[in-house]
């Protein structure tokens, strides 16, 4: 099906990657009348992963995509919490109610698997192809793109590259780009096996070159994460035992969260980012979304939110522009400056937060946070979360 002319258009798209950004992009394209096939390299979508926080911009994007209400129902609002030191003293409090007054929603926490499942449920089963990795895209002629799949090829008007931080398609489009770089930090995380008694919805605790945080879920369980300065590829033989040695004397509920976790539930990943910004998020009739376009460190909790913004913005551009080329130019112009700015801010937040290891620097940062007015934390979140969503037509 070829894209038509006029205000907006109908067409066909192949989305490469079935993660949060890819599924959201597919939902948006289907909402504006496009035929969509999602190609995912995993044979089985096992709904793995830990937890995720969604700020107001992510929720607003989900509303545009028609799944915001379902996600809110499955998520737990984050009204209480903040940032502490290992001995439990507060550095900054989070005021979720103030965020809700400003933005219409507090930050919410949800298992990543639950969000992934809700996004999949918004798509017809037949549009998802699993068990095939797309390593390249062909352009057989003007206005067409061709994607090889396990049963042949798919011709389309548009390809959405949502194949993650190690995107093969990004490498094809921008062979001179250095690709993802190691951030200097590694993250271990898990969801507790059973409910844990928590006094807050969300916390971060900063030590020297380390961070421990938790997100509470609606069923009483919690996600925890530990981020450490570390050489890449470092893997302890027993991750949970290593974490107990590192964080066992930190304040409650950190030891309890570790005790409520099965050893085989711990996920361990080095954090990579696109430290060198891409010169464009599009090339020809291919658009990059999510980590393929702007992989960032998790220090602002904005990675998934930016991918959701990508999906809503791409669908809106295609719904209102008269040609794919002009829609992709608009998508690039709207998304690249914002997402790359958020990525820079996330990197800086990590350097002043979790990655800061010098005792004097840690002491100065902690003093500055304690002395800061109560509204500083809210304003810092608003800087990135207060995003006006587009209309799909």
Image: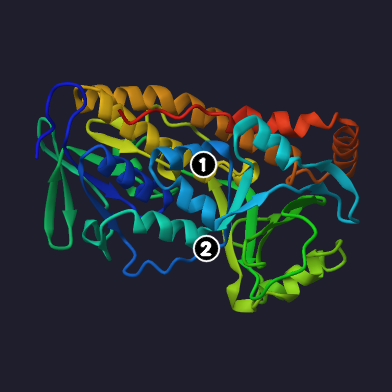
Per the rendering, the mark at residue 162 is none
> Residue 49: in sight, yes or no?
yes
> Residue 274: in sight, yes or no?
no
Closer-to-camera residue (233/118): 118
In this figure, which residue is indicated by the disc labeled 2?
A: 49
- Which of the 4 quarters of the picture holds residue 101? top right
Which quarter of the image is occupied by the C terminus? top left
User: At 33% from the left edge and 48% from the top edge, which residue is drawn?
Assistant: 168
Mark 1–mark 2 distance (CA, rounded to whole Å): 20 Å
Q: Is residue 27 left or right of residue 251?
A: left
Which badge, 1 or 2, comes first in the chain's sequence?
2
Q: Is residue 137 left or right of residue 261?
A: left
Q: Secondary structure at mark 1?
A: helix
User: At 91% from the left edge and 56% from the top edge, which residue is drawn?
Assistant: 87
User: At 61% from the left edge and 49% from the top edge, which residue is drawn?
Assistant: 108
Q: Position of residue 375 (x, y in %)?
A: 79, 29
In the rendered image, the vertical position of residue 346 relative to residue 109, given as above or below: above
How many numbered discs, if any?
Answer: 2
User: At 87% from the left edge and 46% from the top edge, which residue is drawn?
Assistant: 90
Q: Is residue 263 left or right of residue 114?
A: right
Label 1 or label 2, whichever lies nearer to me, is 1
In the rendered image, the vertical position of residue 27 relative to residue 100, given as above or below: below
In this figure, which residue is indicated by the disc labeled 1?
A: 59
Colour setup of the view: rainbow
Closer-to-camera residue (10/288): 10
Q: Secondary structure at mark 2?
A: loop
Q: Position of residue 357 (x, y in %)?
A: 80, 46
Q: Residues within 10 Å of mark 1 (few under 14, many from 20)?
A: many
Q: Is residue 257 left or right of residue 4?
A: right
Whether the residues at callouts 1 and 2 have beta carbons within 8 Å, the answer is no
Which quarter of the image is occupied by the N terminus? top left
Q: Position of residue 339 (x, y in %)?
A: 50, 31
């Amino acid at each position: 099906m070829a894209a038509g002319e006029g205000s907006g258009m109908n067409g066909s798209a192949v989305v490469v990657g079935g993660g949060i950004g890819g599924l959201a992009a597919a939902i948006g394209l289907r909402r504006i009348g496009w035929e969509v096939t999602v190609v995912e390299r995993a044979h089985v979508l096992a709904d793995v992963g830990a937890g995720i926080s969604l700020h107001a911009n992510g929720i607003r994007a989900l509303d545009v995509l028609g799944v915001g209400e379902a996600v809110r129902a499955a998520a737990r609002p984050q009204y209480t919490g903040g940032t502490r030191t290992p001995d439990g003293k507060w550095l900054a409090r989070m005021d979720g109610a103030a965020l809700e007054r400003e933005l219409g929603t507090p930050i919410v926490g949800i298992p990543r698997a639950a969000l992934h499942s809700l996004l999949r449920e918004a798509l017809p089963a037949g549009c998802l192809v699993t068990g095939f990795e797309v390593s390249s895209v062909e352009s057989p002629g003007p206005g067409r793109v061709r994607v090889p799949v396990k049963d042949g090829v798919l011709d389309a008007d548009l390809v959405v590259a949502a194949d993650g931080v190690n995107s093969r398609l990004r490498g094809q489009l921008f062979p001179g780009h250095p690709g993802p770089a190691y951030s200097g930090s590694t993250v271990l995380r898990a969801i507790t096996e059973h409910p844990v008694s928590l006094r807050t919805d969300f916390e971060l605790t900063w030590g020297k070159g380390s961070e421990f945080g938790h997100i509470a879920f609606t069923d009483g369980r919690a996600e925890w994460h530990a981020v450490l300065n570390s050489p890449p590829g470092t893997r302890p033989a027993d991750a949970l035992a290593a974490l107990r040695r590192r964080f066992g004397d930190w304040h409650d509920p950190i030891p309890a969260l570790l005790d409520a976790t099965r050893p085989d539930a711990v996920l361990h990943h080095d954090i990579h980012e696109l430290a060198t910004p891409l010169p464009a998020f599009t090339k020809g009739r291919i658009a990059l979304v999510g980590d393929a376009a702007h992989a960032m460190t998790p220090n602002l909790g904005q990675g998934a939110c930016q991918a959701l913004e990508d999906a809503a913005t791409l669908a809106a551009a295609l719904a209102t522009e008269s040609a794919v080329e002009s829609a992709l130019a608009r998508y690039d112009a709207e998304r690249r400056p914002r997402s790359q700015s958020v990525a820079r801010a996330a990197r800086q937040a990590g350097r002043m937060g979790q990655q800061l290891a010098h005792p004097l620097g840690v002491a100065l940062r902690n003093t500055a946070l304690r002395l800061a007015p109560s509204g500083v934390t809210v304003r810092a979140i608003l800087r990135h979360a207060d995003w006006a969503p587009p209309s799909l037509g």
